[in-house]
């Protein structure tokens, strides 16, 4: 067995990382190129529009070690079953679990496997299904996007692939769990490919081993949908509250395919997520339901792009965020419509509920439209919890905390109403209820 | 023992501004009181102060329920002790269904010692009761699935307040213009409902500018508020007189209170 050595995100670390992995040449070449680009790139500067509101001066990558060694690992987290929220009351078609970027367990329903579904550890499947992986890996997003993306492409480890062949309907969801132990690093890569007419539901959750855990996530998600496929992708982010979270999450949706993407960002100390949906074939349809709920000094930034590249597509993005204590959220949305994307129907909205005088919500919607026959609307609201509402509820016997919790859940209800999976609705509602604290 | 809600020499400010200037009122369980008075005289303020609205500063006097100090209680404790107010302007709570709101409220009020997070009244039992009460009030069951007061018409809001009264069965109910914004048929229905739910079964304080509600709920006592004080108390005939002739006699009889009322109105206009 290879001895896992602790190495940093530097040249020596990269060499040791490459050395420690038994990987095909094409993959190593990809990593080398990414490292070459990434190591030459500068860290983002504060005056850069994407980083004006997100201060990473305190972030020191030298504090985290590269997840070297093979991807198979032993779990160091005792109560893994207790950590995840989305496992309750659902029958799964498959499951994969990683701890600090090491796969600690995976399985796929035999019947699904027989129908050609491929699911499990990405690095294992790089060896057994090289053509499949090679064809799709890093096609939905560009590792040259920024330094974080490039470092991810060089150092990704662990992670998973789901491949659903043409016309196959996976009725039961698959579950992806990622856990970061105290001070750990997670560079998992998620690759989901649905061929023509395929259908699947993916429940993906990220947790810290404890709510307060520190760590680093340098991750990426690629959702690749071929014509007429239907994907429901749920992402519940509950990293420990001292964790840095940098992620590129991109979907590419082809003709007449539908994507329902539900995300809840509740964890981490600082998150900077780029979420993009490319609508690449006529009639593609995407809905995004986003929940952000922050406390203490958490900072969560989402930069979203709904990119209409083909005509007659729909995108409907709704983000609702609540901020307590001294926390802050940033939402910067963009609907981009290419010249040929006529008959686009684009919608984006961000509503904020500011729960304390010291918390803050930045909301920056944007449109960039080159076609002339489109319907694009956007909106953003920021409100405070109304003392009159709280008083009214208290006159009906609610304690202050119960009243606040109810008003906050009510605020998110519009999102719940859009989520079609009951267990997800319940898990989200519970996660939100847990996060509401006492106010005076 | 009959329950007693007792208000003694109550003074209330909003900010620096005095609104109530020494209100005395005792309501026994089972009695119906009418509270009348011109706009801006302080009727709603009295109700909100009894409920413990944080914006209404009690600068003097006492409120007690069966001898217990109401002013020392949080608003939700007051509700759990059995004091209820139907709001002149109820608040909307978007995203929260009437049924869920009421189930939680009903549980808390019926089980005053319930701790946060403890079980609510069983769904089935609650639904059955809610449905009965709603059909009694001739409300569509769909109503329970709507969000609390969100996008309700004026009339719907008032009917929703009556439904809450019916579910919570308080010891004392302060009804603040529960008849306003209703059409003629709805006023009759509301008046009958209140009589059925409340009359003789609780202490009622009915704030109104119309006579229909009092026709169905004949008050044993009528109080007239002017300039933040109850300047006159009589029986049912006083309410009839005021409906017939307005407040001229009162204004002339109590020039100090009238001056205070004018002062409040003037300040309001200046804001
Ligand atoms: N929250 C507040 N802020 C400022 N002034 C207030 C507030 N609440 C009440 N007031 C003032 O106190 C006075 C009494 O108001 P209140 O609402 O109690 O009158 P009311 O008798 O209920 O009148 P109406 O018949 O119009 O409902 C008014 O001058 C009003 O402007
Ligand atoms: Mg009033």
Image: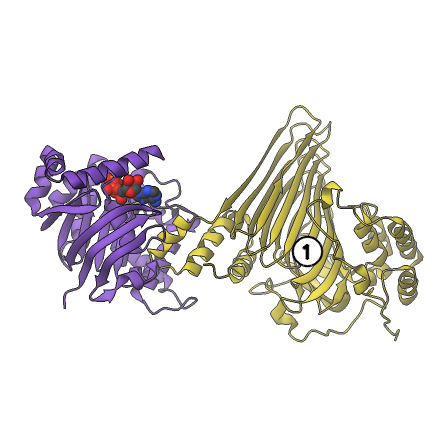
Residue B243 occupies quadrant: top left
Q: Secondary structure at mark 1?
A: strand
Q: Position of residue B25 (x, y in %)?
A: 16, 54
Q: Report the residue at 50% width, 61% height from top.
A: A437
Quarter of the image containing the C terminus of chain B? top left
Residue A390 is situated, as x and y percent measured from the top left of the image, at 40, 53
**Can residue A358 be seen in the rendering of this structure?**
yes
Chain letter of the yellow region: A
In front of the other: A378 or A308: A378
**Residue A389 in the image: x percent, y percent?**
40, 49
What residue is rendered at 20% in x and 51% in y?
Answer: B22
- Residue drawn at point x = 13 percent, y = 44 percent: B214
Q: Position of residue A84 (x, y in %)?
A: 62, 65
Q: Nearer the viewer, residue B46 or A300?
A: B46
List the residue tagged with mark 1.
Answer: A270
In the displayed structure image, the side of residue A106 where residue B98 appears, left or right? left
Residue A113, relative to residue B156: is it above or below? below
Packing grade of label 1 (10 A; few <14, some 14-19, many >=20) is many
> What is the count of numbered marks?
1
Q: Is residue A260 visible?
A: no
Judging by colour alone, the chain drawn in purple in this rendered image is B
Q: Is residue A101 left or right of residue B128?
A: right
What chain is tagged by disc 1?
A: A
Which residue is outermost to the top? A372
Q: Where B161 falls versus A58 (above or below)? A: above
**Residue at disc 1, CB closer than 8 Å to ligand 1:** no
Quadrant where the N terminus of chain B is found in the figure: bottom left
Which is more toward the observer, A47 or A91? Answer: A47
Q: Which of the 4 quarters of the picture holds residue A60? A: bottom right
Q: Is residue B42 left or right of residue A412?
A: left
């Amino acid at each position: 067995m290879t001895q896992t050595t602790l190495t940093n995100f530097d040249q020596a670390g990269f060499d040791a990382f490459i050395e420690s992995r038994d990987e095909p040449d094409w993959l190593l070449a990809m990593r080398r190129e990414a490292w070459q680009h990434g190591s030459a790139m500068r860290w983002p500067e504060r005056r850069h529009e994407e980083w004006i509101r997100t201060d990473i001066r305190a972030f020191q990558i030298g504090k985290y070690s590269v997840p070297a060694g093979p991807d198979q690992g032993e779990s160091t987290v005792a109560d893994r079953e207790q950590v995840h929220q989305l496992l309750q009351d659902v029958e799964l078609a498959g499951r994969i679990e990683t701890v600090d970027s090491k796969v600690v367990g995976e399985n796929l329903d035999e019947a699904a496997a027989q129908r050609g579904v491929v699911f499990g550890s990405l690095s294992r499947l790089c060896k057994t299904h090289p053509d499949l992986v090679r064809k799709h890996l890093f096609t939905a997003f560009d590792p040259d996007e920024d330094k974080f993306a490039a470092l991810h492409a060089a150092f990704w480890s662990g992670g998973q692939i789901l491949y659903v062949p043409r016309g196959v309907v996976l009725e039961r969801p698959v579950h992806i769990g990622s856990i970061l132990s105290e001070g750990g690093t997670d560079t998992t890569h998620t690759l989901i490919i649905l061929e023509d007419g395929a259908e699947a539901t993916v429940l993906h959750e990220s947790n810290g081993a404890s709510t307060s855990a520190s760590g680093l996530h340098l991750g990426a998600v690629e959702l690749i949908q071929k014509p007429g496929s239907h994907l429901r992708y749920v992402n519940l982010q509950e990293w420990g509250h001292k964790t840095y979270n940098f992620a590129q999450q991109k979907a590419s949706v082809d003709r007449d395919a539908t994507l329902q993407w539900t995300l809840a960002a509740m964890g981490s100390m600082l998150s900077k997520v780029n979420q993009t949906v490319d609508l690449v074939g006529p009639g593609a349809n995407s809905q995004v339901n986003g929940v952000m709920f922050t406390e203490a000094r958490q900072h969560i930034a989402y930069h979203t792009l709904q990119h209409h590249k083909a005509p007659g597509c729909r995108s409907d993005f709704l983000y609702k965020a609540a901020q307590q204590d001294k926390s802050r959220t940033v939402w910067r949305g963009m609907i981009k419509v290419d010249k040929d994307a006529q008959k686009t129907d684009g919608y984006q909205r961000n509503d904020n509920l500011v729960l304390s005088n010291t918390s803050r919500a930045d909301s920056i919607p944007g449109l960039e439209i080159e076609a002339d026959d489109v319907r694009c609307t956007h909106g953003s609201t920021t409100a405070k919890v109304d003392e009159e509402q709280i008083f009214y509820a208290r006159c009906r016997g609610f304690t202050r905390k119960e009243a606040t919790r109810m008003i906050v859940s009510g605020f998110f209800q519009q999102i719940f109403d859009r989520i079609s999976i009951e267990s997800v609705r319940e898990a989200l509602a519970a996660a939100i209820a847990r996060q509401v604290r006492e106010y005076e | 023992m009959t329950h007693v809600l007792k208000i003694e020499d109550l003074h209330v400010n909003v900010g620096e501004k005095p609104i109530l200037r020494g209100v005395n009122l005792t309501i026994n369980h089972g009695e119906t009181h009418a509270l009348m008075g011109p706009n801006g005289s302080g009727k709603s303020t009295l109700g909100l102060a009894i409920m413990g609205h944080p914006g209404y500063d009690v600068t003097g006097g006492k409120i007690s329920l069966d001898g217990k100090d109401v002013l020392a209680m949080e608003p939700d404790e007051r509700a759990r002790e059995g004091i209820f107010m139907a709001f002149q302007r109820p608040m909307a709570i978007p995203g929260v269904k009437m049924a869920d709101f009421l189930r939680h409220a009903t549980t808390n009020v019926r089980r005053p010692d319930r701790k946060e997070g403890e079980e609510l009244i069983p769904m089935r039992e609650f639904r059955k009761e809610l449905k009965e009460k709603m059909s009694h009030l001739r409300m569509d069951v769909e109503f329970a699935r709507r969000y609390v007061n969100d996008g309700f018409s004026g009339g719907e809001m008032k009917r929703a307040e009556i439904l809450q009264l019916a579910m919570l069965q308080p010891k004392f109910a302060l009804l603040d213009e529960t008849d306003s914004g209703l059409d003629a048929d709805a006023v009759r229905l509301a008046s009958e409902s209140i009589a059925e739910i409340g009359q003789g079964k609780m202490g009622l304080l009915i704030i109104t500018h119309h006579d229909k509600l009092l026709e169905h709920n004949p008050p044993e006592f009528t109080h007239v508020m002017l300039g933040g004080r109850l300047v006159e108390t009589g029986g049912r005939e006083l309410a009839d007189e005021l409906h017939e002739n307005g407040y001229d006699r009162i204004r002339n009889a109590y020039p100090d209170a009238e001056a205070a009322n004018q002062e409040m109105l003037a300040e309001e206009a200046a804001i």
